[in-house]
Image (tube, rainbow, N blue to C red):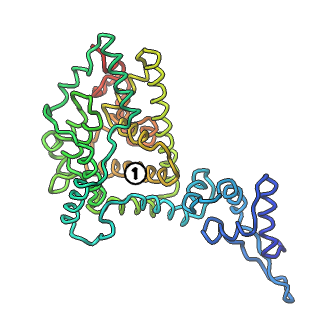
Amino acid sequence: MSTDTPSAADQLLLDHAHRHGLSVTEKNLEVWRSRRLLPGNIPGGGLGRGKGSTSSPAPESFDLVLGLARHAGRGKRPTDLALLLFDEGLPVPEPTARAAFMAAVDTISVHGDDEPDSDPDQRLDDLAAHIADAGPTVTLVPARARRIDEGIARLARAGGHTWPPAELASLDENPGPSPSTPKDAALAAAAAVITGSMSLEDIGDMLRAMNPTATANPLASLVETTRKDVPEVAGAVLTDDGHLALGPVRDARDHLRDLAATAPLEDLARAWRTAEGVRQWALDLCTRAEDELAAGQLGEAAREWQNCRYAMAGLALLSTLKERDWPPAQHALDTLLLLYQLREFQRLDHLVPGCQWHLLDTEGLMPLPTRELLQDLISRNAPRAGAGADEAPIDRQAGPWSS
């Protein structure tokens, strides 16, 4: 047992930081402890005869002090520091880490949050009026994605290929859709936050608006025709008024807060790494597609881009490009959304046995890092080699601009 006095215990941490070329003061230690980023020293036995008592730093304090010294600075919020420590796999106190994830959920704000007890229907009416008058709109297709879409279409047509691919028209059962305007999308998104649900029609409209150059959108069509095509599934997963609900109908932020409070830390860490992987995958695909466009040659990246734009992975592309900066709070929010998606798939697996989860492994349907996160589901009923799998909505070999 150490015979250091409490200040001497702190000196061990200060010396440890100094040996690693980092400057830390006793005031820093005091502040970090007050913000629950650093545990207090562990009391030991008394020295006797009024000489005080011993203490020693908690074992995890040595690594935490180095992490805090690297990341702390003017303007850094305690929640950001906690998430940066979490990102490095450092032993940030669990209550502090969970509080930081919950604080990330609080960054989602909706008009009328200051009157949470108002009648839900009245609140939706007020929200619609607010957005119609002068409220926010949603950027559905960021400029970078729009330039890539236009560049691929231009080169494909210049090469004499059919564009968009005619085959897609046969897969879309809604020949006269009405995609969302930016204000429509803003209202639908805000309503989804405060109700935790969205109608299939709104989802289909949003999907179409996110790929406005497509003459057909098979994924949107699949959503819109769920009740007709698979009524038994619709009955299990939709509310009485035909909305897709995120679990029990309530504010979606409450679902995310529950995850932040209860999900095992290893699950949060895995989803955190996956969210980072999805962002890097999206940015890399953008760069590769742009390189092909600059060279005037459509290749593997353009094919992958188009497969994604016609499927769910395209939503990750657009979401990434909307967030030019990616602060820790946004990383935490993306982590919770990704983990929620995984939990919803698991819930659906219990509600509707026999789901063809192996189709999630189709290129373009999900970002590659997300497919890796879902491997337990995907591999469960993957077709055996040579057994023949269901055809993917878009051929994974031929480019979608093929004639």
Give the residue pinned by disc 1. Answer: 337
x, y percentage for residue 143? Answer: 38, 34
Name which quarter of the figure residue 178 lies in: top left
x, y percentage for residue 374? Answer: 41, 42
At horizontal 36% and vertical 35% (from top left) the residue drawn is 314
x, y percentage for residue 94? Answer: 56, 64
Screen quadrant of the N terminus: bottom right
Tag 1: amino acid: Leu
Left or right of 365 on screen, residue 288 = right
Q: How many marks?
A: 1
Can I make out residue 268 in this image?
yes
Left or right of 283 on screen, residue 352 = left
x, y percentage for residue 279? Answer: 47, 40
Left or right of 312 on screen, residue 74 = right
At horizontal 47% and vertical 16% (from top left) the residue drawn is 295
Q: Is residue 232 above or below residue 396?
A: below
Q: Residues within 10 Å of mark 1 (few under 14, many from 20)?
A: some
Foreground pick, 342 / 15: 15
